[in-house]
Image: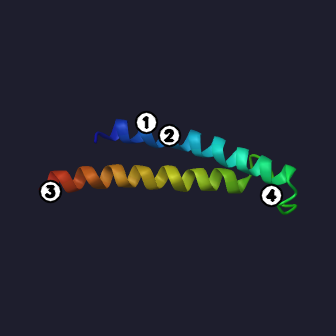
């Protein structure tokens, strides 16, 4: 997979993960299940979305390198 397509896929996945984590956090806050330190748009949401996007980007590049090695 070309680097551009991998980066595009990772950025789209980052946006989707951020929206999903923000929605889950909002639901947890409204249901009084979240601790006081958890907030919308906080470190947990951005960190989780970065982990998901970084993992997807590395997997896309790794599969390309694996195919080039064959």
Where the N terminus falls, by quadrant?
top left
Q: Position of residue 11 (x, y in %)?
A: 50, 40
Q: Quick check: 53 left or right of 67?
A: right
Vertical arrangement, residue 9 with respect to residue 54, above or below: above
Q: Which residue is mark 3?
A: 69
Please report contact status of discs 3 and 1: CB closer than 8 Å, yes or no.
no
In this rendering, the answer to whether 34 lies above or below 13 is: below
Q: Give neighbour class at mark 4: few <14, some 14-19, many 20+ (Cα, 10 Å).
A: some
Q: How many angstroms separate mark 1 from mark 4 (CA)?
A: 29 Å
Q: Is residue 69 left or right of residue 47?
A: left
Q: CA distance from mark 3 to mark 1?
A: 24 Å
* Disc 2 to disc 3, C-alpha distance: 26 Å
Question: Which residue does the numbered mark 2 point to in the structure image?
Answer: 11
Q: In terms of secondary structure, where does tag 1 sit?
A: helix
Question: Residue 12: where, in percent of width, then height?
Answer: 50, 37
Is 17 on the left-hand or right-hand side of 7? Answer: right
Disc nearer the start of the sequence (2/4): 2
Verify CB contact (< 8 Å) between mark 2 and mark 1. Answer: yes
Residue 18 image offset from top left, x and y in percent: 63, 44
The residue indicated by pointer 4 is 38
Q: Residue at x 11, y 56 (%)?
A: 70
């Amino acid at each position: 997979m070309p680097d551009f397509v991998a980066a595009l896929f990772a950025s789209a996945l980052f946006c989707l993960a951020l929206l999903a984590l923000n929605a889950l956090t909002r639901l947890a806050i409204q249901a009084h299940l979240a601790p006081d330190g958890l907030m919308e748009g906080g470190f947990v949401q951005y960190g989780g979305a970065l982990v998901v996007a970084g993992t997807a980007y590395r997997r896309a590049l790794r599969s390309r390198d694996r195919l080039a090695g064959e």
